[in-house]
Image (cartoon, rainbow, N blue to C red):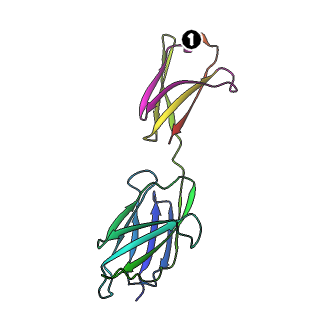
Amino acid sequence: MRPSLLFRNRGVEIFSLRLLICAVTLIALPALAANSVSLVWNTSVGVNVAGYKIYYGVASQIYTNAVDVGNVTSATITGLSGNTTYYFAATSYDNNGVESGFSNEAILTVLPPMAPTLTSTSHVNGQFAINVSGVTNECVVQASANLVDWVSVQTNTSPFTFVDPNASQFSQRFYRTYYMP
């Protein structure tokens, strides 16, 4: 019986393949933090298994990172870059440190974070207010009178409400946000 390896990032990308080593099933849980993947697996049916290693990199079968997770059945790989495809494989090892061969490879593409969301809340006494939400990173609010020249007017951690007390000084004013990773 060969178990399956399943990776998921924010519930968007799912890849499945069979492990050829140590009868371990790895499952990636939805990312708990930005740019991370959580793995859970069943204990190996092999004898004398002392622990597991997860290998990964940005090119197929070229693993530039290794994480010795010990003799546990879960791990979280953090520090993954957005908009990047990663290739993962697993091994088991015994008490002498002898590792099994690599499992088949699983592929995960870390998606970039969602863009911040702007919603208008009020326009009273020459002030304009908008709610910024949708991400939990720092966001920069920029304003422009011509959609060409943009000026940063506030940096804050989302969600927050931005109030522009200078809105009445312009015949028209446009707003945009971007997140700071």
| Residue 4 x/y as whole percent | 44, 78
Foreground of the two, 34 or 13: 34
The magenta region covers 145-167
Question: Badge 1: how crowded within 10 Å, few (<14), some, or many (20+)?
Answer: some
| Residue 19 x/y as whole percent | 45, 81
User: As drawn, which residue projects farthest toward the front?
Assistant: 96
| Residue 170 x/y as whole percent | 62, 13
For the residue marked with disc 1, what is the amino acid? Ser
> Residue at (64%, 13%) from the top-left corner?
171
Residue 86 drawn above or below residue 147: below
Residue 173 in which image quadrant: top right
> Residue at (56%, 70%) from the top-left corner?
62
Is residue 13 shown in magenta? no
Residue 107 drawn above or below residue 160: below
Residue 163 drawn above or below residue 89: above
The quadrant the N terminus occupies is: bottom left
| Residue 155 x/y as whole percent | 48, 28
**Which residue was labeled with disc 1?**
168
Foreground of the two, 115 or 5: 5
Residue 167 drawn above or below residue 96: above
Is residue 151 shown in magenta? yes
Question: What secondary structure is marked by label 1?
Answer: helix
- Count all numbered tags in the image, as a single digit: 1
